[in-house]
């Protein structure tokens, strides 16, 4: 990761590929150890599928909220990694 190379600590998406791989192989603890935000991705997938089948305005709003929660999770993870690096 270029971010790790430049700054010396992981970016918020570091470990996400390995986490998704582990999650799809039902290794949940291992997946969360790579990147905790992976736990929110199935929720997004369900909301995305529901939005496709039930094109209701409410589903689209809920999907937007889920995206905001995922982004907030990534920001919190980034802050945690920064604080952990400098402490």
Image (tube, helix red, strand yellow):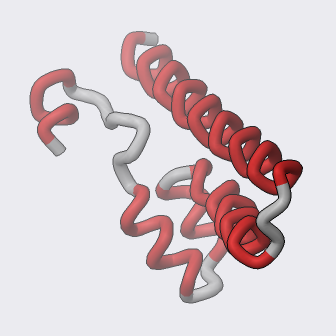
Pinpoint residue 60: horizontal percent, then vertical percent: 75, 51
36 with respect to 14 (left or right): right
Which residue is found at the position 58% from the left and 58% from the top?
A: 38
Please name the residue shown 76% across and 78% down the image: 53
Q: Is residue 50 left or right of residue 16?
A: right
Q: Identify the image quadrant of the C terminus.
A: top left
**Where residue 50 appears, x then y in whole percent?**
78, 71
Left or right, 41 with respect to 7, comes to right
Residue 9: quadrant of the picture:
top left
Answer with left or right where residue 8 lies relative to residue 77.
Answer: left
Q: Nearer the viewer, residue 1 or 47?
A: 47
Q: How many marks?
A: 0
Q: Nearer the viewer, residue 47 or 76?
A: 47
**Residue 59 location (% of width, % of height):** 82, 56
Q: Quadrant of residue 71?
A: top right
Relative to residue 58, is residue 6 depicted above or below? above
Instruction: Examine the image and state in which quarter residue 45 appears.
Output: bottom right
Pick the residue in front: 83 or 49.
49
As drawn, 73 above or below 41: above
Please state, as top left, top right, bottom left or bottom right, where the N terminus lies in the image: top left
* x then y, percent, for residue 47: 75, 63
């Amino acid at each position: 990761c270029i971010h790790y190379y430049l700054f010396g600590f992981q970016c918020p998406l570091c470990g996400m590929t390995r986490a998704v791989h582990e999650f799809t192989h039902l290794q949940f603890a291992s997946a969360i150890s790579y990147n905790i935000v992976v736990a929110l991705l199935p929720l997004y997938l369900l909301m995305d599928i529901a939005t496709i089948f039930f094109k209701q305005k409410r589903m689209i709003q809920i999907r937007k909220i889920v995206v905001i929660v995922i982004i907030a999770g990534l920001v919190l993870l980034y802050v945690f990694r920064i604080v952990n690096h400098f402490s």
